[in-house]
Image: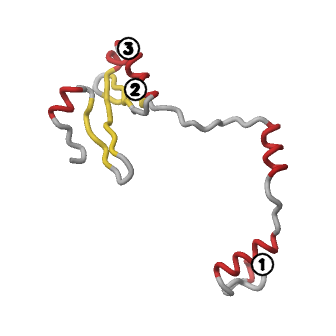
Amino acid sequence: MAGQVTQEEQARCPCIVSRCNTAQYIREMKTITQRELAARSKAVLDDVEAGEVYHITRNGTVIAEVRPLSGRRRFVPVEELQRRWRDAPAFDPAALRAEAEELFGDDAVEDDNPWDRG
């Protein structure tokens, strides 16, 4: 049941408030108080490392969300960018256009000036 938490689930983990159902996954949304976070920070962070998402409340209001970091790097060294650019396949605009015309048909505009299209 979407959004419904069973009594068994509530007994196992009292911080579960609802279940989020989507076509791709089923995930339990966990909400804990600021005090619980302070008391159980190691267990909470272990859960977050395992993929759980927690909402932290203060005086009954959600003030934060603790979630795992994405695995993507934000900084890429210049040397790596240069290597990727050097190793990238050559770009041939004529071949790209021919492939697009083959894929989309001959409906292409003869002139490349978008202002003349009508």
Quadrant in the picture for the C terminus: bottom right
The picture places residue 76, in percent across and down from the top left corner, at 73, 37
Q: For numbered disc 1, what is the local secondary structure? A: loop
The vertical placement of 34 against 54, above or below, is: above
In front: 63, or 80? 80
Q: Which residue is mark 3?
A: 38
Q: Quadrant of residue 60?
A: top left
Q: Which residue is mark 2?
A: 47
Residue extending furthest toward the left: 7
Q: Residues within 10 Å of mark 2 (few under 14, many from 20)?
A: some
> Of callouts 3 and 2, which one flags the residue occurring earlier in the amino acid sequence?
3
The picture places residue 98, in percent across and down from the top left corner, at 75, 78
Amino acid type assigned to the residue bearing label 1 in the image: Asn
Q: For numbered disc 2, what is the local secondary structure? A: helix
Q: Which mark lies nearer to you, 3 or 2?
A: 2
Q: Which residue is mark 1?
A: 113
